[in-house]
């Protein structure tokens, strides 16, 4: 990402939330941006935070990569020096022309997104409120992510969740249907090619094996996937969104915490995933319920079964945290695994 201004910082935040690794190539003469609106202060102070995300200044991009590239970085190395080091998959910025650097950055990244100079600086030709909203850093950042997703299909965080479910299915942590997410051979191989680049399925099963896996899915698996798919993010194409919906639903029927069966690092990543890929549904979780419980409550409302609970919750050590109290023995409830219990 070229620059450290408000737009560049908003784009960086959006991409990091989606799971991308980001380095900000600092301008030689950065614009003055009020404190708290960008990562520009990192160039002077060594680090800066925005919306709880840290950006730190690095002197050498190669060293940042070797150290794992954990934080957003900003670097004063010239663009023509950075590009051969980083070999970026995506390059975003304004004025990405031969005149902007000794080496033309075009052709240095498979995808180049060139922002209009006015958008990159946050300036508007027309200062009225409607046009200002259209050109706001947040809107520009959302547009950049949508452009990338038109090529990638799913963001890295979502691909990690799909891969995590498949991994947990093969290890026996999830039931048999999760091994193919309910898809036939053709669709499953397309999913693996898109989400697990360079990885071949461990088994070349017969078509009947895929049908057998699909037949083991719980009765509410399909309704849950359709609930998710109906509220996918506007920029998320239907096919990759269906892959993710199947993975999320399969994890929802697991016996552990949702984040564990998705193969993610914790609930915070599940929240990011929901906001990113199913934002309309995520906004409905106004009580900040645990995501598995929320999804089954939402499904129950849709099916006319209010109070629907996820399966396998009774023995969980986090039951009280999810439901507010321990469930008295013998209390009836509507369980997603098979009805009233």
Image: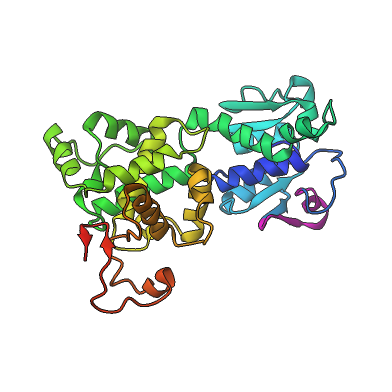
The answer to whether residue 185 is left or right of residue 138 is left
Q: How many marks?
A: 0
Observer-nearest of 217 and 196: 217
Q: Where is residue 92 in the image (x, y as percent from the top left)?
A: 66, 32
Q: In the rendered structure, which segment of residues is drawn in magenta?
A: 38-53
Point out the image quarter for the C terminus.
bottom left
Point out the image quarter for the N terminus.
top right
Q: Where is residue 298 in the image (x, y as percent from the top left)?
A: 40, 52
Question: Which residue: 22% across, 58% down?
Answer: 339
Question: Which residue: 25% across, 79% down?
Answer: 329
Observer-nearest of 174 and 277: 277
Question: Residue 194's quadrant in the figure?
Answer: top left
Q: Is residue 308 above or below residue 216?
A: below
Question: Residue 116's quadrant in the figure?
Answer: top right
Q: In this view, does 215 lie above or below 259?
A: above
Question: Which residue: 43% across, 57% down?
Answer: 291
Q: Position of residue 218 (x, y in %)?
A: 22, 50
Q: Is residue 106 above or below residue 16?
A: above
């Amino acid at each position: 990402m070229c620059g450290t201004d408000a737009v560049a910082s908003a784009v960086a935040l959006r991409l990091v939330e989606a799971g991308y690794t980001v380095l900000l190539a600092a301008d030689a003469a950065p614009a003055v941006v009020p404190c708290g609106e960008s990562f520009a202060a990192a160039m002077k102070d060594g680090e800066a935070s925005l919306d709880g995300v840290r950006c730190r200044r690095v002197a050498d991009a190669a060293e940042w990569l070797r150290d794992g590239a954990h934080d957003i970085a900003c670097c004063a190395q010239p663009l023509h020096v950075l590009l051969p080091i980083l070999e970026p998959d995506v390059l975003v910025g304004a004025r990405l022309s031969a005149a902007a650097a000794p080496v033309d950055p075009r052709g240095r990244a498979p995808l180049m997104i060139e922002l209009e100079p006015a958008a990159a600086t946050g300036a508007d030709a027309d200062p009225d409120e409607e046009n200002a909203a259209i050109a706001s850093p947040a809107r520009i950042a959302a547009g950049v992510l949508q452009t990338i997703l038109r090529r990638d299909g799913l963001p890295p965080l979502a691909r990690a969740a799909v891969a995590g479910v498949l991994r947990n299915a093969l290890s026996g942590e999830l039931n048999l249907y999760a091994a193919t997410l309910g898809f036939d051979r053709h669709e499953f191989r397309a999913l693996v090619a898109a989400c697990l680049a360079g990885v071949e399925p461990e088994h070349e099963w017969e078509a009947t094996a895929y049908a057998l896996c699909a037949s083991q899915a719980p009765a509410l698996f399909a309704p849950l996937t359709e609930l998710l798919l109906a509220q996918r993010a506007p920029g998320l194409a239907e096919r990759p969104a269906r892959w993710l919906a199947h993975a999320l639903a399969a994890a929802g029927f697991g016996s552990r915490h949702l984040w564990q069966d998705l193969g993610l690092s914790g609930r915070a990543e599940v929240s990011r995933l929901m906001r990113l890929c199913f934002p309309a549904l995520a906004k409905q979780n106004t009580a900040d319920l645990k995501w598995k419980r929320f999804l089954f409550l939402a499904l129950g409302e849709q099916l006319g079964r209010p109070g629907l609970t996820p399966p396998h919750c009774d023995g969980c050590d986090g039951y009280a945290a999810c439901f507010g109290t321990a469930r008295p023995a013998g209390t009836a409830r509507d369980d997603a695994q098979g009805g009233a219990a």
